[in-house]
Amino acid sequence: MRNRIIAAAVIAGLASTFAGPAPAHDGPTESVKAKFDRSIPNIPGKSIRVVEVDYAPNGASRPHTHAKSAFIYAYVLSGAIESRVNGGETRRYKTGESWFEAPGAIHSISRNASTSKPAKLLAVFIVDSDDNKLTTPVK
């Protein structure tokens, strides 16, 4: 029972970390939903957290960083996503394609590549278990 309460609290914290609209490059927003959160039993102090990011047509995330311990694997579930990490080139990823972000990365562009169709990605975080704030906007 205690584990369920802790899990519910962590998921609520994740939801509040990601919930709410974020301004896009032309106005529409993203929607982020916590999908999974579990400590990794054979790696003490580490957890895996998974979120699903839905982008409206023309939707985008603000430039951001992630928890300092976060290693992230991103997989495009539908549509096409444009992404730019650490000042590298802006890349377009289509359904079934993926990329990763190393700890400390700055994600300056994350947006739907389409102005008329939605896009969706799954982001898998490997983080220190006590890192509860997964995303921080860059000013």
Image (cartoon, grey):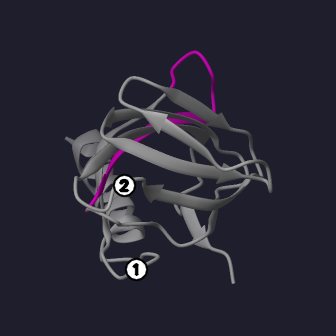
Q: Which amino acid does label 2 sit on?
A: Val
**Front residue (pair 7, 134):** 134
The answer to whether residue 108 is left or right of residue 25 is: right
Q: Can residue 134 be seen in this view?
A: no
Q: Where is residue 100 in the image (x, y as percent from the top left)?
A: 63, 34
Where 123 falls versus 61 (above or below)? above
**Front residue (pair 134, 87):** 87
Where 36 falls versus 136 (above or below)? above
**Front residue (pair 19, 129):** 19
User: What are the residue bounds of the magenta stretch?
Assistant: 40-56
- Is residue 120 located in the magenta-colored stretch of the structure? no
Disc nearest the viewer among 1 and 2: 1
- Classify residue 108 by image quadrant: bottom right
- Classify residue 31 by image quadrant: bottom left
The answer to whether residue 27 is left or right of residue 4 is: right
Q: Where is residue 101 in the image (x, y as percent from the top left)?
A: 67, 40
Please report contact status of discs 1 and 2: CB closer than 8 Å, yes or no: no
Crowd around label 2: few <14 · some 14–19 · many ≥20 (10 Å)? some
- Is residue 55 located in the magenta-colored stretch of the structure? yes
Q: Position of residue 45 (x, y in %)?
A: 63, 35
Where 76 falls versus 67 (above or below)? above
Crowd around label 1: few <14 · some 14–19 · many ≥20 (10 Å)? few
Which quarter of the image is occupied by the C terminus?
Answer: bottom right
Q: Which mark is drawn over residue 26?
A: 1
- What residue is at 35 percent from the left and 29 percent from the top? 95
Where 99 falls versus 115 (above or below)? above
Q: What residue type is labelled 1?
A: Asp
Please give the residue where the numbered disc 2 appears in the rendered image.
10
